[in-house]
Amino acid sequence: MKLVVGLGNPGSEYEQTKHNVGFWVVDALARQLAVELMKKKFDALWTQIRNGEQNFLLIKPMTYMNRSGFAVANFMRFFKIAHADLLVIVDDVHLPVGSLRLRPAGSAGGHNGLRSIIEQVGGDQFARLRCGIGRAERAADLAGYVLSGFCGATERAHAQAMVQRARDAALVWIAEGSGAVMNRYNGMTIEQNDETRPRSRAKEERTDGE
């Protein structure tokens, strides 16, 4: 059993903010897989997906960002999920808008959601898919920056494309693991078009399991 977690804040006032990119990716996964996160458990919206030999959970913690770890830890205990079978999808101010970077383990890097998960699950040996949202001009503006929306048509288009790539990267992680995602997606630039994006393999994996 694998667990894919998208981080964000509940409520309509946060829905379109940069800090909710993790929610956007999980929603994109749900649409791709024709499922809905309607069930409520451990203060999270969730669903379970069985697709061929793949068996995984999608969840969105509803605890607000800095308490995300409580929901994640409860799911891991209840479903007996190992750290190696956890993928957390988060926004990252250290990456340009539209960039992706997967790491199989590591520190919170200043992200409150990751910090909460590390504290509650008792370790940092789990994969995290970081989605670039760019950086605030001044450090003092960081909170306001992550809780604002993407600006301008170009930035919004880059963010939308990133969400689709992150969705595909998560499907690759489910089927093939962290190494495959790192090889195909880390360092990918915005300029790469649909013909060069490695999304077909992820779709093939899902189709083959049906």
Image (cartoon, helix red, strand yellow):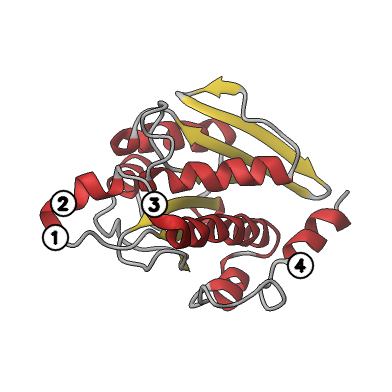
Mark sitting earlier along the chain (1/3): 1
Residue 136 sits above or below residue 122 on the image: below
Mark sitting earlier along the chain (2/3): 2
Report, in whole angstroms, how far the alpha carbon at label 4 lies from the one at label 2: 39 Å
Q: Which residue is mark 1?
A: 138
Report, in whole angstroms, how far the alpha carbon at label 1 lies from the one at label 3: 17 Å
Mark sitting earlier along the chain (1/4): 1
Report, in whole angstroms, how far the alpha carbon at label 2 lies from the one at label 1: 5 Å
Mark sitting earlier along the chain (4/3): 3
Q: Quadrant of residue 97?
A: bottom left
Mark 2 and mark 4 in contact (Cβ < 8 Å)? no
Pick the front one: 115 or 125: 115
- Judge left or right: residue 176 versus residue 156: right
Q: Is residue 1 visible?
A: no
Res. 200 mark: 4
- Specify the quadrant that holds the N terminus: top right
Residue 59 sits above or below residue 39 on the image: below
Q: Which residue is mark 3?
A: 150
Mark 3 and mark 1 in contact (Cβ < 8 Å)? no
Q: Amino acid at mark 3?
A: Phe
Q: Secondary structure at mark 2?
A: helix
Pick the front one: 172 or 99: 99
Q: Amino acid at mark 1?
A: Arg
- Closest to the camera, between mark 1 and mark 4, is 1
Report, in whole angstroms, how far the alpha carbon at label 2 lies from the one at label 3: 15 Å
What's the residue at 87%, 57% (across, down)? 208
Mark 1 and mark 2 in contact (Cβ < 8 Å)? yes
What's the residue at 52%, 52% (across, down)? 87
Pick the front one: 84 or 25: 25
Q: Amino acid at mark 2?
A: Asp
Q: Which residue is mark 2?
A: 141
- Closest to the camera, between mark 1 and mark 3, is 3
